[in-house]
Amino acid sequence: MSATQRIELKGNNIMFNFNSFKEQVMKEYDLGNSFKKVIERIEEYDGEEKVEELERSLREIDSILKEKRIRIEAAENYLNYINDCISERRKEKDERLNELRKEVSLLKGEGGIKRKKKDIEEPIKLKRLNSNNTKKERIESKDENSIKNKTLIKTEKSSEREEDEEDEEFILNERMVKKYEKMFEENEVETIKDNVKYLMTWVEMNKMRILYDSVIDGSNYEVIFDKIKKKPNIYVIIIDNNDNVFGGFISHSIKVLSEKEEENIDIIEDNNHFVFCLYPSNDERTTMRWIPKDYEEDEEQTEDIDLLSYGGDIKIWSKNEFIISIGNFYRGWIDIASIGENCSYNHSLYMVYQGMNQSCCNGDGTPFSAERILIVQMGK
């Protein structure tokens, strides 16, 4: 009787239909060339004098099958776990989105979302100033229709009072400019040094101090928060692994750490918020800044998500893979990880800032690492 038909292993009371077993194994498992060789060796057997060799071959098959079964079961269990997580996450997002839609619908029914109307400048491409000029220079708006003395950014102490008063002109203090240029030069941040006049002029403030520097203070979120909490008028400046320099400004103070729950992130309305890119004085590109878009309130033109994604902010996160985020956390933002970690990412920041190019602030879709972070407070 052939081994490929029916085999009786004497003394073990084992009856084995090899053809059926072979078809099942080859159908369910791809065991590779090594397994096929085992099959071929068994098929060559015909006679009882090689029972031990056959037993050894069968044990090899059993060992291979056990290993394959374990791996397949583990893979199936992991896939089932992932599918369960995806289903649960999708369910949570759907529920939250429905809640937000109901809230928006309720607000519309009560007369619409009321927003303060304000004059917003178009993105400004400033003419680079000569740092060697000893005269006091005044920066005027490029819009010919605007008031001559209107400065680039208006810091509102009392909007009702300022509507009745003429804006005071901002005078750039050249002595302070030189002082802070030297400060940044000593801290080996040449690009910031070359742009001190921009940083002052944008916010109408002549005083600066470094609250936080990752080179000195590290990149722990608790240290960052302790350095800047309750301090208004701050620039967050990022220097990446390609020497790009960019960041954001807020006039309000950060009072608490944030927890990154994508469905529930508060954005503080800050009329003075903007993002920017800084370039060295010898670069052909020009330093730029961008202010948030102001979405239309026309119900026929505005999606619910637009109402949620108004404005921008800066967050310091606790217990998260990122430590800082800048932008709007529904439609477009940029996440900054700890120093040296190549997972910082621009999530469509250009979608929420006026006139911003998609490639600005590392917006090309490639992860990058922050090599240095500075937080600078401005004052008058």
Image (tube, helix red, strand yellow):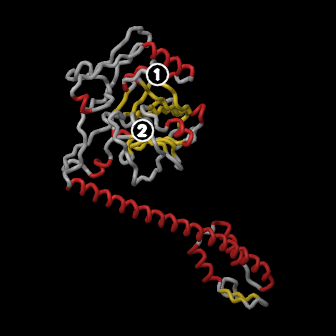
Q: Is residue 68 left or right of residue 108?
A: right
Marking on residue 363: 2
Q: In this orientation, does residue 285 appear?
A: no
- Which element carries disc 2, helix, strand or loop? loop
Pinpoint residue 238: horizontal percent, then vertical percent. 49, 33
Give the residue type that dot 1 points to: Pro
| Residue at horizontal 73 percent and vertical 77 percent from the top | 59
- Above or below residue 345? Residue 61 is below
Residue 296 visible from this viewpoint:
yes
Q: Is residue 69 left or right of residue 299?
A: right
* Residue 42 horizontal/vertical position (percent): 71, 77
Image quarter in which the N terminus is found: bottom right
Q: From the viewer's perspective, is the residue at label 1 or at label 2 nearer?
A: 1
For the residue pair 175 and 131, the one nearer the viewer reads as 175
Badge number at residue 280: 1
Looking at the image, which is closer to me, 118 or 192? 118
The span from disc 1 to disc 2 (Cα, nearest Å) is 20 Å
Residue at x-position 44% and y-position 31%? 235
Q: Earlier in the sequence, mark 1 or mark 2?
A: 1
Q: Is residue 239 above or below residue 281?
A: below
- Amino acid type of the residue tagged 2 in the rendering: Gly
Image coordinates of residue 35 in percent, x first then y, are 67, 70
Residue at coordinates 44% horizontally, 53% vertically from top-left? 261
Label 1 element class: loop
Q: Is residue 323 above or below residue 15?
A: above
Q: Which quadrant would the C terminus be assigned to in this image? A: top left
How packed mark 1 is, by other alpha carbons closer than 10 Å (few <14, some 14-19, many 20 or more), is some
Residue 114 lies, with reference to residue 18, above or below; the image says above
